[in-house]
Image: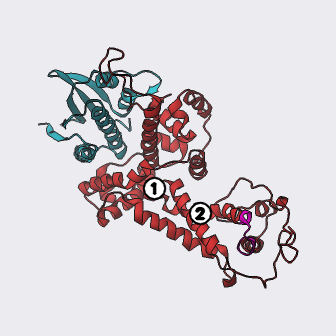
Amino acid sequence: MAEHVALEVPATPDALGVVRMVLGGLGAQLDFSLEQLDDLFLASERLLRAALAAESPDRLQLDAEVDGPCLRVTVGPFFSAGLRERVACSRGRCLDLCTLLRGTLDEVAVEPRGEGFAVVMVKRAGSGGR
Amino acid sequence: MSDHGGHTLDDPLGLGPLPGADGAFPPDEAFPPEEEEVGEEPFAPAGPQADAEGRGRAESDKLDQYLLRRYHLHGDRKAREQLITMYMPLVRSLARRYAARGEHFDDLVQVGAIGLIKAIDRFDLDRGVELTTYATPNIVGEIKRYFRDKGWSVRVPRGLQELNIRLNKVIDELVPQLRRSPTIKELAEAANATPEEVLEALETSQAYNSVSLQSTMNGENEDEAMLMDYLGDEDEEFEVVEDRAALAPGFQKLPPRERRILHLRFFEGLTQSQIAERIGISQMHVSRLIRRSLERLREEIGDIERPSPPGGDGRGPDDGDHRDDEGTT
């Protein structure tokens, strides 16, 4: 059975430390390299900071699931169309949020969740430092 | 300033007499323009005369004494400036010893320079010691004080601080051994700690680095110092990268090496380890530089790409807000 952690933290930059610790623990189980963890931390931090700037939510919800060699992290729901666009679309030749997420994760997707959407980030063990 | 009126002044450079009874100073040309400093290990004062004419240690000491006398006895600020310039390689050499502890190398150089200036200002001509001997503990003391006062922005237990420092060394050892980035378990084993402790210690490094992330950088100076320390082989693609990077206003504010690292990481798809190998620095250092430059870009973009007026383009209140975009390449 896949290990699943549901986390809800105050929507403040300080809470990023808790997120890192949880993701780090799960990543360590999957034998992620330090570099892979660093990529995962960078991606989740940038996404959450962007969400804080776009929506000013009170709480952040995060689900992390170990699925075979993959760590699948779902963050949301979010409701900002601008945030959605920035996650899903790169403006080209631009180190924007989309490019950064794609450069650090194995998969990034936007999925409907209620009236909003969630961002799904997948990091795979053994995928190098991508 | 002390009174040393009875000294016989040596003139090792043949620059002419110091102001004495006749009050005459050598002309400005007596201090030739400073040349770029080279050669930091082992330390030798970087002076144009010392480099150009291959003077030995004894002659350097004579030059030190000469300049110190000019400054302390006659208030010659140029002599003071020249001493500072000559001894900056010593500062950099000492700062490098502490650079692996998470602080920016350039920050440490600046702090060390304060120690050097204090040493020059407080130097006692009558004590008969060399400036190097006197300045070294002053510089190191200033750097240590900086670490003590500012290194950890959040109070972190000493055990975790020590583990963090130990981990930095372990990582540096393991990466070349394994030829890849180590896992948490491998780090834990090598550092004689549990994986949980390793994660916790790595998390503390966020607190350790936060001062550096916020600190002001000095653009060219910083890059110059870093390049001198860490630059590896030439990369023929660098010119191309430079051309592309030059298109981006945010990127232009970054030092060339950081532009190059971001480009390689996010547009060429190289891993941190691959970048580290190509540039000749550690993977951890690449990681720190990526975070630092992204943070800096975010600050720059905040000024360059202002949010659109709410509803101005009909897309919604936050659609024009690109505050977290990192830059353009």
Q: Residue extending furthest left?
A: A1
Residue B212 % position (x, y) = 44, 51
Label 1 sits on what residue type? Glu
Q: Residue at x 31, y 24 (%)?
A: B318
Q: Is residue B125 above or below residue B99?
A: below
Quadrant assignment for the N terminus of chain B: bottom right
Q: Which numbered disc covers residue B91?
A: 2
Q: Give left or right: position of B162 versus B106.
A: left
| Residue B207 appears in the figure | yes
Q: Which residues are magenta?
A: B70-79
Q: Which numbered disc covers residue B20?
A: none
Q: Nearer the viewer, residue B3 or B48?
A: B3
According to the picture, the residue beneath numbered tag 1 turns out to be: B103
Badges 1 and 2: C-beta atoms under 8 Å apart?
no
The picture quadrant where one finds residue A43 is top left
Q: Chain of mark 1?
A: B
Asked whether B75 falls inside the magenta stretch, the response is yes
> Magenta-highlighted stretch: main secondary structure?
helix
Image colour for chain A is cyan
Q: Is residue B294 above or below residue B82?
A: above
Q: Give left or right: position of B129 versus B282.
A: right
The picture quadrant where one finds residue B130 is bottom right
Image colour for chain B is red
